[in-house]
Image (tube, grey):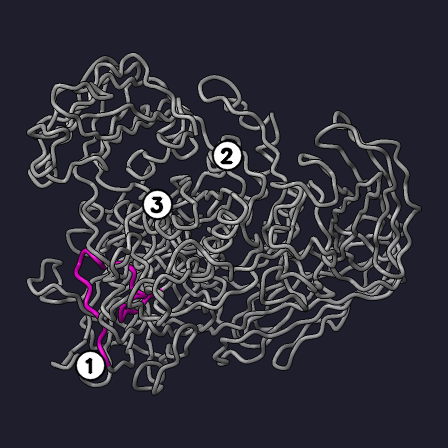
Amino acid sequence: MRRKRATPWVALLATCALAVPGVAAAQGAATSQLDVGDPSVAVETDREKIDVMGIYAHPDDDAGFTTPCGVWHDRYGVRCGIIMATRGEGGSNSVGSESGPDLGLRRENEDRTSHVRSGTVDIFNLDRVDFFYNTSAPLTAEVWDATETLRRTVRIIRETRPEILVGSNPAPRGHGNHQYAQGRMVWEAAAAAADPTMFPEQLTGLGAVEPWQVKKILAGGQTNGAGGTQAPRCMDGFVPAADNPFTVVGTWTGFDSPYTWAEGNLAGQPAGSPKTWAQVGREGARAHPTQARTMVKDVVAPTCQRYGVSQSVVPMQPNGTDAAANDDAVLYGAVVADPGGMPLGSTMTLANGGYFQAAGEPFDLTVTLRSGDGDLAGGEVRLDVPAGWDVSDPVVVDAVPDDADTRASFVVTPAADAQPSRYRIGAHFTGDGVTAYNDTRFELVPPVEGRFQRTGNSAEYDAWAAANDAHVGGRSPAIGTIGAGESVTVPVEVTNRSSQAQSGDVALEVPEGFTADAASRPYADLGAGETTTVDFVVTHTDPSDPGGRNETFTATTTSGLGSSSEDMDLFLVPSVVVPQLGAAPVVDGAGDDYAGTAIDVGTRWEGDACEPDGTDCGAGSTAQVGWFDDAFYAHVRVTDDVASAAAPPERCFGHWLVDSVELLLDPRGDSPDTSSTFKLGMFPFTDDPQGTNGNGPDGPCWSRDADNHQGFSTGPLADTVEQGPNAPGVEVAVSADRDASGAYAGGGYAVEVKIPLEDLPAAVGPTSTAPQGDEAANTVDPTYLGLNVTPYDSDTQDFIGATRTAWSAFGSQQSEPHRWGHAYLDGYAPPADRPVEPSAPVIPDTALQGVESPQTVYQSAARGGTISGVQPSDALTVRSVKIKKDAARISYQVAEPGTVRAFVWDGDPRFVPVWTSSCAGDVYGFSACSDEDGAAPPWAPDMGGHLLGTVSAEVDAGKGTVTVPLGAEARAALGEDSLVLVSYADSPSDGAAPGDGVNAWSFPVERRVPGHVGQGG
């Protein structure tokens, strides 16, 4: 990095210094004073290049990146970086009371600390909100503002110019934030960064960057196979599995690191002996105490860390070659020259006529080559295709220049009897002393294929994969939902990929307990390239079935070219009639006012088994429900023996960490995610001896979570919720007596609740007639209220949940309404003016902004590049920084209104240890020499004692001063490892992104001998 010398205004920096007691004087002087030295400035500091960049959603998602980056950095001089979409502000906190932006500050440090020993000190936060757990990439894209998220990511890539991007699978499973950030964003950003028409404002003006072509993507590729070694060159002898079409690269993690075992370490290792990178990486990966991670105190066995290469525009080594076994093979063609001899910067790509191809149908494939340095002699290009397939002859090319593309075109014909699967085609170039290899993948599908119709997030994912040519995650799974006793339409889409019109049948096989209105249905004269839909009506025959299981349906499609089949997982969920009550129940926790059969809410869907079932949790947990006068009522009796930790009212969120009951309501029964639902988490007791929450001493509290309007719903904090209150008229009462030992009297507790239906995001129903298990009597594709009741059990006092049970007991209950049960409100009709379209979700933006984080400000100033990937600004000039007796004063001149923030920091700003350690000389806090080591040291309010002072000020155009007060302890802590950090953000203008237009400064504090002029003097 080149840090420019100070501009002329630096001469104005402070000459008024602070005498620091106890600092030894230089050359016999009586005292040593402090001054401020030349700054690093974000817009003036050259941005260091990144070689390998990982993209992730939350701190700790990148835990697996610590080890390989350590090896690559230590052995090959590779610089890793990380783009982090959020700081995890929406996550839990197992070691402190921080939440929202305060938690984001703490989790950012955890992430920086986890990577610092691996040499990864460049972590770029995008300042996206960590809003709630969900399984929807489309919802994530909407909440994060997909265009702005992409814009920031692209700018960071163009600034840092990474050769390789690392992410994960974009397939529609797991956390939606993960699907979007480390799944989709990798592909979208790589394409956009190379496209000069994308975000052209980044290419001119202050901080101008240029388009950048990423060379490899490691995201979503398979790594399964056989062979390899547990030693250096760990890919030696590795062969990808027959069903794995990806080239696999690997790095041995057992190499010695520069870090050593401490004297007296609990692992019993010789003092001073080197730790392996597997050890260092795992220690870093666990450095997230807020997320209930614990300190690594034992020995970690090394492994071969593997990646499937999901895209490459440069030559690489095919598995099976000698060079492919090397531990730096992942870098070939991108960071270091490929051993085949093509110069670094050379490209080699394969392009076919489409990802999906049909057996027996020919398609074109083109190989394109370009030299990275000087013209190469010509040679032969040939293809490797699966056995039994036809391919045109090798192509001889005259030359491979560095200023033009050389192309070789082929025709590939899959075998007529080739089985549907993903396949790899490899391309080889052999020239004068030069060889090169690359490959591509495509999916072979039946010439005529019947697939269950995708809806919601599954359909959206398939469309995204096609639009971005990013099929590494495979096709979306076929899923559906049916309530016990219901009748639903099951569509099958038939596509003809052959060159001739086709006719045939679609047969539907259903499991026991189901009927279909036809065993099969025909289709006729389906033209080449066309799709038609064949519908079936399926009925479940037992309305009393408790559900909670997957049933498999099979569609078999025949044509003149053969047959194809696909299975669908159909979620069988319970259904219930919610009776109209004769009068409004008295909400007192007793539950004496309900009619109808109690529903079982004791089936485990996640977490530890109830031991014993029916005592610890589980069996015997029931709920009774009813409605009266536009309100929904429920009385829930929970089996439990040991009471959990008691949350204070300000911690009445994260109900899954303690004993609680969540009631989940989907008003229209068709929500693709929980942003259009109502979810209420109810805590049966709190740590509130004075009854400040308004529900009596240690009384209950309740809050909405991960839904249309999340946040506190009771007590004084309910008034702090954006657009609150979010649950007016809700009443909760409990019966939760605990004895002195913390056991529940009577073997459990009860929660009773009233929810006005007008609180829901849309009108409920009117719901259909309750299902009868007979198509002739049923409403096909009925209307219902999505409903679930989910008790949570924790037997500890440290805010860590154990077991989750429910009425409709499928995984991901908290995030996927299509897994909830179906409720029919007998006789209920909503008011005529109540909207049937859900209201827009209210999702508070609790994201910490980069300009508010001293660690982010330091990185931007000292290492170059803008904060959070937004456009830079030179509107602010720092005229002087002066350390006075009781304050640090920053004088400025600014051309535009904005916000100036200043931080006085002591120590290394790259990290703050997250564990306590008694080991001598353990700077990073990762060694354990006592059983007591591994606690989380104090953090708030001063970032572990490192943040000595801070100020934030809105400023208008002109000159001014901001002052950071410094108390006696802060003054005493100042020394040569202290910094004054400054950030600036323009005030948002119409059409601009919030906080767009930023800059950052880092001023080192220096000792100065009286009578001598220092750098700042």
- Which residue position is annotated with label 1? 744
Near mark 3 (Cα within 10 A), the count class, few <14, some 14-19 or many ≥20, is some
Look at label 3 and name its amino acid.
Val
In which image quadrant can residue 389 be found? bottom right
Q: Can residue 180 be seen in this view?
A: no
**Relative height, residue 210 to residue 58 (above, below):** above
- Point out the tag, 2 or 3, that comes first from the N-terminus: 2
467 lies left or right of 259: right
Camera-side residue: 614 or 578? 614
Residue located 35% across and 46% down the image? 843
Q: Where is residue 544 in the image (x, y as percent from the top left)?
A: 48, 81
Look at label 1 and name its amino acid.
Tyr
- Point out the tag, 2 or 1, that comes first from the N-terminus: 2
Q: Position of residue 505 (x, y in %)?
A: 81, 65
- Which residue position is annotated with label 3? 842
**Relative height, residue 271 to residue 899 (above, below):** below
- Which residue position is annotated with label 2? 49
Query: Which residue reaches farthest right?
Result: 393
472 lies left or right of 594: right
Q: How far apart are marks 2 and 3 (CA)?
A: 39 Å
